[in-house]
Structure formats: structure tokens, C-alpha cells
Image (cartoon, rainbow, N blue to C red):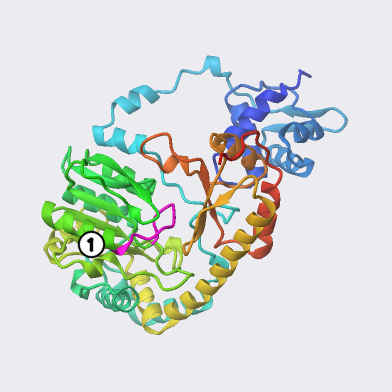
């Protein structure tokens, strides 16, 4: 039996590769170990490093390594012998003996649109509320008992009717409730007949892109911008044109090509957090009128505004039916509900509903009905008031912690609302610091990746909404261990 333990550098590289998955450290280490064994990088009967040694090499606790070794022993990958060590017990072919994956062939078989989608990258959302994963609400404080009661009532009285196919435009009482809420809370103009209920904002963007854009059409995108929108609209073959964002939002210049569509997050620009000024809103609406182009207003988290009163929706200023308003219940209620909505100009209602039938037909009937009841009985408004106060206190705590403990590392961008804050890093340091943060067990979503045209700004989006006060403090304490030789420039 071999007694040669693998070199430390190999384990460090494998462990860092596994950290692209936002899982606990133990699960990340298990992933790295399995991959090494399955690929044959670590041969059958080879001895693994001692738990104390590997823990020191990776910068994690010995308890975590012990737990990972125990898990793989239970799965049959390892055999552990007292006084001798841990050995590979599963026999896999080495990488050189395995035929190379057909990645090139598989990609060659994709359509041009398929290539575009893959190149755009995924939009993977965090599964667990790891500090500081961005965009997650706190699901621990959702009124689950109330929701359960509403579900039971609906199933008791309407189970058969809600089990069938639904209206592709959406459950009528929910569309009425959405239209009333949007008018009251966001000053959105439009009736229930103009509401289209969808599974997600991402689905809405794909649907609208396919409905409104032809190959080569120009789309103005905020720079930086939400990557999911960028991927969805680029997949149509459209030409994405990045338009810089300043403290007043999107700032188009006169030399830009005429757009067919403009994508905006005017109430709370993603990711900078600024609001599109009134003068810019009016100017962009005038461009849309003159150019006969569409504006998608993605109002993804307008329910959570903490400083002063938020501006009404940009759609409320539109007098020429050029604005398509998008919203979602993923942040205000919970992500797995899978309900979003669009308030459409009258000319788009019928074609958009027809295209919806070609996607998934309709959203879950029961969840639509329960959501309508949740809104109509006042639970939605009560829940939003409570969560808005809570999230504000968590945002304030995160800002206080950063200011007190990380002024050398992070500079906070003003954040009047939302579920995350944007922080700037010393130029050139994002990759280095993100790697260190992963090893420390902290998620630090990248700002650089949200730019269409490099070089982008070094920074992170730090989510706070899903974290308790103790979790925020612990996350900041872990970030205090990060080191960089790149200072902020004046």
C-alpha cells in the first residue's frame, strides 16, 4: 500500500476550485477530495495528508477536515486506519487514461444563440444565506404559519380548480391585486388586463428579448448592469451597447447608435444603488418616443427603500406606452415562489401572452391564488413594513462595521435601499481579495463581472438582508483577516 501523501499545492488548488460553489467549507472540501479521487489524481491506496497537516495547508479548522474525511469514509472513497492514516479506497482511472471530454464537440453542436447563452455565464443565486451573498431575503422571518393557513384554505375549497391548466396571462384575482398594489405603492399606471404573471424576472427578460429584438438590434445597457439581463438580451443576437452610469443613473452620449430597446433599473440602479434622476428619466422617455424604441424598467427591489421616499416608477411618467414595467415577489416574499409580473403597454398584451404559452404555459395556480389572498388580506403590507425596518437596521449595522473595522480595505457606495451594498476595493485587488475571502468562508460577489466592457471597477456587492446582527459582525471579522499590498489611490 502506498504511503506517499499528495503535495500541499495540489490540495490548495483543488480546494480553491471547489469554492466556486457557495456551500459550507466541509462540503467544499468533500467536493475537492471526491474530484481528486474520481479523476485519478490521487491513486487507489494512496495516503492522504493527516487532518492536522491539511487543515494547516488550507487555512481551515481541523474539525472541518475531520468531518470531510469521515463523510468520504462513509461514502466508500476512503479507508481510515488508526495509527496509519487515511487511504484512497475507491479505484478510478487516472486522468491520462480517460478519454478527453467532448466539450469542444458539444459546444460546436450548439446554435449561435446557445453559444451566446453559455458565454454570458449563469445567474446562480445563493442556496444558503452565507455572508455576504447578495440579493437574498431573510426567509427565517417569513410568516410561514400564515402562508400555510392560506394554502390549506385554498386546497380545502378550490383544490380541483387550481390543479388544472391556468390562464397564461395569470390568475385574474392576482392580476387585480398586483395592479392595485403597483398603483398605490409605485404610482404605476395600468389595469389588471395589462398585467402578465410570469415565473421570474429572468423569464420576462428572455420573453421580451425574443418578442421585441432581431439580430443586430441595438440595446442600451447600464454599465455596470445586472448580468442576467445582459445574457438574456444578448442571446437574441442583439448588439449590447454599454452606457456609463454616474450618480444620476444612465448617462447616454449623443454619439450612441439609435436603440431598439433600453434596459434600466431606475429606482435603485443595480449594482451602484443610485436612482435615475428626473431629468434623465424624461430625456430617456423622449428618446424612446422619437426612436420608437422600448424601455424595460426592472424594479427588482423597490419594496425596500430606507432613506426618504423612493421616486415613483418611471412608467408613471410615460405618456406614449414605451415602458414595460417588471417586478418580482422573489425578494418581497420568497424566491421559490417563482412569481414575477410585467405591466405591459396595451399593444404588447396579446403577443406577449401568446409567447408565454410557448414557454411554460402558466405559473403555479395554487401559488398565484395564495399570493392574491396574502396581498388582499393585508399580510403583504404588514410583512413589507416589518422587513423594511429590519433590513434597514442590518444595512446600518454593516455600514458601521465596515467604517469601524475595514476603512483600509473597503469604501462604501451610498445605498439608500436594496438588499446589498456596493463597496469599492483598491484597484487591482479584487481577484486576490476574493480568493482570500473564499478561504475565510465569506462570499463576496464580484463587481468586476457586472461590466460589459473591461476594465471594470474593483469591488464587491455585500448582501446583508438575510443575515442576523451576529452573522454580519462575524462576516466582517473574517474580512478583517484579508491582506493586500495595493492601497487606495487618492
Residue 62 placement (x, y as % from top left): 78, 40
Q: Which residues are magenta?
A: 268-278
- Say which quadrant the N terminus sits in: top right
**273 drawn magenta:** yes
Q: Residue at x 46, y 18 (%)?
A: 99
Q: Quadrant of residue 258?
A: top left
Residue 166, visible in the rendered structure: no
Is the residue 485 above or below the residue 214 in the image?
A: above
Residue occupying the far right of the picture: 83
Q: Residue at x 44, y 23 (%)?
A: 101
Residue at the far top in the pictured view: 96
Q: Is residue 238 above or below residue 176?
A: above
Q: Position of residue 126 (x, y in %)?
A: 51, 51
Q: Nearer the viewer, residue 186 or 407?
A: 407
Tell me the crowding category of disc 1: few under 14, some 14 to 19, or many 20 or more residues within 10 angstroms, Cα based. some
How many labels were placed on the picture? 1
Residue 225 higher or lower than 141, as above or below: above
Residue 352 horizontal/vertical position (percent)? 18, 58
Give percent across and percent down for residue 280. Answer: 28, 58
Quarter of the figure with the C terminus: top right
Q: Relative to the observer, which residue lies in front, 416 or 36? A: 416
Residue holding disc 1: 282
Task: Residue at the far bottom: name it.
Answer: 377
Instruction: Inspect this view and state whether residue 414 appears.
Output: yes
- Left/right of residue 489 with respect to residue 273 in the rendered view: right
Q: Which residue does the image show at 59% across and 65% down from the upper left?
A: 396
Relative to 375, 241 lies left or right = left
Quadrant assignment, res 216: top left
- On whether residue 132 falls in the magenta region, the answer is no
Amino acid at each position: 500500500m502506498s504511503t506517499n501523501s499528495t503535495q500541499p499545492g495540489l490540495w490548495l488548488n483543488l480546494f480553491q476550485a471547489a469554492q466556486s460553489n457557495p456551500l459550507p467549507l466541509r462540503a467544499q472540501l468533500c467536493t475537492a477530495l471526491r474530484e481528486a479521487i474520481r479523476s485519478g489524481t490521487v491513486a487507489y491506496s494512496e495516503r492522504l495528508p493527516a487532518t492536522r497537516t491539511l487543515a494547516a495547508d488550507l487555512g481551515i479548522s481541523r474539525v472541518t477536515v475531520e468531518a470531510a474525511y469521515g463523510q468520504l469514509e462513509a461514502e466508500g472513497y476512503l479507508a481510515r486506519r488508526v495509527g496509519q492514516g487515511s487511504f484512497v479506497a475507491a479505484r478510478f482511472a487516472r486522468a491520462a487514461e480517460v478519454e478527453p471530454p467532448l466539450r469542444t464537440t458539444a459546444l460546436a453542436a450548439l446554435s449561435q444563440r446557445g453559444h451566446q447563452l453559455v458565454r454570458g455565464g449563469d445567474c446562480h443565486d445563493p442556496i444558503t444565506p452565507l455572508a455576504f451573498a447578495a440579493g437574498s431575503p431573510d426567509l427565517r422571518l417569513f410568516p410561514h404559519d400564515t402562508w400555510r393557513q392560506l394554502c390549506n384554505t385554498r386546497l380545502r375549497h378550490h383544490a380541483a380548480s387550481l390543479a388544472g391548466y391556468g390562464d397564461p396571462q395569470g390568475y385574474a384575482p392576482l392580476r387585480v391585486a398586483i395592479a392595485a398594489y403597483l398603483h398605490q405603492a409605485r404610482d404605476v399606471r395600468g389595469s389588471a388586463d395589462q398585467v402578465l404573471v410570469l415565473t421570474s424576472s429572468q423569464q420576462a427578460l428572455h420573453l421580451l428579448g425574443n418578442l421585441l429584438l432581431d439580430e443586430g438590434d441595438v440595446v442600451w445597457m447600464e454599465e455596470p448592469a445586472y448580468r442576467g439581463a445582459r445574457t438574456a438580451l444578448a442571446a437574441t443576437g442583439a448588439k449590447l451597447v454599454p452606457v456609463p452610469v454616474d450618480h444620476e443613473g444612465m448617462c447616454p452620449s449623443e454619439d450612441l447608435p439609435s436603440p431598439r430597446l433600453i434596459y434600466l433599473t431606475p429606482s435603485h440602479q443595480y449594482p451602484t444603488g443610485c436612482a435615475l434622476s428626473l431629468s434623465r428619466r424624461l430625456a430617456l422617455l423622449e428618446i424612446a418616443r422619437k426612436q420608437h424604441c422600448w424601455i424595460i424598467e426592472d424594479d427588482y427591489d423597490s419594496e425596500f427603500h430606507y432613506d426618504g421616499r423612493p421616486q415613483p416608477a418611471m412608467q408613471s411618467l410615460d405618456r406614449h406606452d414605451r415602458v414595460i414595467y417588471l417586478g418580482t415577489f422573489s425578494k418581497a416574499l420568497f424566491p421559490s415562489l417563482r412569481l414575477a409580473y410585467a405591466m405591459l403597454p396595451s399593444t404588447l398584451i396579446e403577443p406577449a401572452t401568446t409567447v408565454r404559452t410557448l414557454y411554460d404555459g402558466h405559473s403555479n395556480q395554487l401559488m398565484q391564488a395564495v399570493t392574491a389572498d396574502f396581498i388582499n388580506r393585508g399580510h403583504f403590507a404588514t410583512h413589507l413594513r416589518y422587513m423594511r425596518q429590519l433590513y434597514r437596521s442590518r444595512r446600518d449595522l454593516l455600514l458601521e462595521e465596515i467604517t469601524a473595522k475595514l476603512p483600509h480595505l473597503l469604501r462604501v457606495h451610498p445605498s439608500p435601499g436594496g438588499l446589498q451594498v456596493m463597496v469599492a476595493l483598491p484597484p487591482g485587488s479584487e481577484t486576490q481579495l476574493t480568493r482570500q475571502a473564499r478561504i475565510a468562508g465569506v462570499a463576496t460577489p464580484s463587481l468586476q463581472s457586472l461590466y460589459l466592457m473591461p476594465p471594470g471597477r474593483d469591488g464587491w456587492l455585500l448582501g446583508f438582508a438575510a443575515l442576523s446582527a451576529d452573522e454580519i459582525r462575524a462576516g466582517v471579522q473574517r474580512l478583517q483577516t484579508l491582506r493586500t499590498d495595493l492601497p487606495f489611490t487618492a
